[in-house]
Image (tube, rainbow, N blue to C red):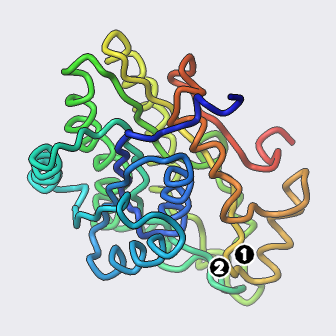
Amino acid sequence: MAFEKFDLTGKTALITGAAGLLGIEHALALLESGATLVLTDISAIALDTAAQYLSQLCDPSLIRTAVMDVTDPSAICGVSEMLSSQGLRVNILINNAAIDPKVNGDHGVLEASRLECFSLEQWDLQVAVGLTGAFLCSQVFGSAMSRDGNGGVILNIASDLSVFAPDQRLYRRHDVPDELQPVKPVTYSVIKAGLIGLTRYLATYWADKGVRCNALSPGGIYNGQGRKFVKRLTSLIPVGRMANTDEYRSAVQFLCSDASAYMNGQNVVIDGGRSVW
């Protein structure tokens, strides 16, 4: 069969930040391929909402949830031990958790700060979730994949901003002085570029144990942003539009399955061509 290598039946995948916009899409992608899912997130309420939504679309018996703080090693180890006690081996880890300041309407990036006054507290928090969390989860679940000889897959969710700097003109407001203009914060670029470095390191570290690691770098996803922002961004994208929420599913299926068995240490950028224009 043409798509036999995409089949994930019998495989268990754990997704961090699973209650977020892309987390749910990654879950749908793997459920479509037959995987058993362990959805993790720091918010029990958001996690329950996500699980209920997914259960309406897919087989509920394939969905499990676990509240997990990716910045807490003991919480990660606790989830690992719980899954082992249930006879589940994590074959696929998707490091998706992140704190991502969003664009709201035409009012720029919320919760973002200019470099001159960006707080150390926010730096530490965002790096802890988006980068250290990926390291800690890889340390726990990747180590387990490497020990029994069966290998596994780690997929780090980066961004097109892993390969170029944010264009701060996208967020400008005409009624705001230059020194107060909203910007994409420094942490986002640092974290996403850091994930690519982590990807390359992990790809070589356990390669002899059958553990592969790649990164997926999505471009901008349309999610109700304001008209001005969308117009500015789409003018930078050769295909002339932002991505739909479901347009990364096939890439996730490919990268998490045997269809990509010879791909290791790569950063797959899917951004409508923005990074090559």
Q: Position of residue 37 (x, y in %)?
A: 37, 54
| 168, 11: nearer the viewer | 11
Q: CA distance from mark 1 to mark 2?
A: 7 Å
Q: Quadrant of the C terminus?
A: top right
Label pair 1/2, CB-CB below 8 angstroms: yes
- Compared to residue 176, the image places residue 171 above or below, namely above
> Which residue corresponds to mark 1?
172
Give the residue displayed 25% in from the left and 55% down from the top.
70
- 196, 42: nearer the viewer: 42
Disc number lying in front (1 or 2) = 2
Q: Amino acid at mark 2?
A: Gly
| Occupied quadrant, residue 172 | bottom right
Q: State the residue lying farthest toward the front.
A: 1
168 horizontally vs 210: left or right: right
Q: Residue 205 at x, y = what percent?
A: 33, 17
Q: Which residue is mark 2?
A: 108
In the image, 208 versus 135, the foreground residue is 208
Q: Position of residue 34 (x, y in %)?
A: 49, 47
Image vertical order of residue 148 relative to residue 29, above or below: above
Figure quadrant of the N terminus:
top right
| Amino acid type at image mark 1 | Arg
Q: Earlier in the sequence, mark 1 or mark 2?
A: 2
